[in-house]
Amino acid sequence: MPRPVPNPGILDIAPYTPGKSPVPEPGRKVFKLSANETPFGPSPKAIEAYKAAAAHLEDYPEGTSKVLREAIGRAFGLDPDRIICGAGSDEILNLLAHTYLSKGDEAISTAHGFLVYPIATMANGATNVVAPETDLTADVDAILQRVTPRTKLVWLANPNNPTGTYLPFDEVKRLRAGLPAHVVLVLDAAYSDYVSRNDYERGIELVSTTDNTVMTHTFSKIHGLAALRVGWMFGPAHIVDAVNRIRGPFNVSTPAMLAAVAAIEDTAHVQMSKEYTEHWRNWLTEEIGKLGLKVSPGVANFVLIHFPPKGKTAADADAFLTRRGLVLRALGNYGLPNALRMTIGTEEANRLVAEALRDFMAAK
């Protein structure tokens, strides 16, 4: 019997596969370090705001996320009218692709970029063009070499997930200057809150000074609201207007909106998380490096650990750690089969991973 047929190209898309979740076992403590979730959870003020919203669950949300856009505007010095909020930054990435990509178009992403980029691109009938990286870092020249008259979007996670590397602001500006005027540069700043490098800028300046750059951000990482799915975009007025025309009118729930407002206003919680993350990122890099394993120099809330292709492999390390209740992220689907990504967790989890890797490397 005939049955519905998906649009061309849909079945060519590799579905997104999240990091595995631990399976609890009696008598064993388990640590999930596979999804870059904060070990602190959200601000207590965000939890309080979320609970307070339960009194009015019968009411539709305010359709433009006005209170949240205004809170983001206050936090970053931005015009709220140039901000769009969404159900996680994932939704906004897909809205951008739906707005600017169609059959015959191309979008460029980097070799180890976020997996949502090719999915969003291909879902709209466009071709995903992959630019190689240099030392697991986006390469501006490689991106520019792949631009054609069909290029409509360039996706750039800065810092990048899963490598943790970043492009200095001068390089991002060079990329924007080298792109044709009709190409939208999407700067995904999901992990920007963890960066403290002087040569880094999350993208606000470029958005403010060009007509073809947007910056996306999320409340899932340092703010700890991953379960609520809240993200946002800052962009030129004409891009915001176009995307708003296809955005769902109630795409951010009221509890999520109010929790996000409280989260972004609790700057002490954010600063504490940033300082903790930097301390333990440095500690893990040093301790794991002592074992003869390379750790990529990262600036986000995770570390990328490299293993040899033979002998003490990433797959063997993953199995060894999992048996000890330490769940990291395997990266075969990111083209990094010899690496594991570890979220910076509690002090207990961090020390246990270092200890387990020491035992793994010493085992015969």
Image: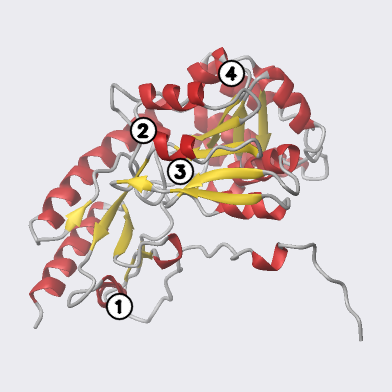
Of the numbered discs 1 and 3, the one sitting upstream in the chain is: 3
Give the structural element (helix, strand or loop) at label 3. loop
Work out which residue is located at the far bottom of the displayed protein and give it: 1
Residue beneath disc 3? 221
Label 4 – label 2 distance at C-alpha: 25 Å
Kindly identify the residue that appears in the image at 66 percent across and 33 percent down: 85
Give the numbered dot on residue 306: none
Mark closest to the chain's N terminus, 1 or 4: 4
Question: Residue 64: x percent and y percent?
Answer: 76, 29
At label 2, the amino acid type is Leu
User: Mark 4 or mark 2, which has the lower sequence index?
Assistant: 4
Specify the amino acid type for callout 4. Gly
Q: Residue at x 59, y 51 (%)?
A: 128
Q: Foreground residue, 14 or 284?
A: 14
Residue at mark 1? 319
From the viewer's perspective, is 43 left or right of 292? Answer: right
Q: Of the residues shown, which amino acid type is indicated by label 1?
A: Ala
Residue 296 visible, this angle: yes
Front label number (1 vs 4) = 1
Residue 233 drawn at (x, y percent): 61, 30
Name the residue located 43 percent from the left edge and 60 percent from the top edge. 334
State which tag comes first along the sequence, 2 or 3.
Answer: 2
Q: Which residue is mark 4?
A: 73
Instruction: Tell me the tag on residue 167.
Output: 2
Q: Badge 3 local density, few (<14 within 10 Å), some, or many (20+)?
A: many
Report helix, strand or loop for mark 2: loop
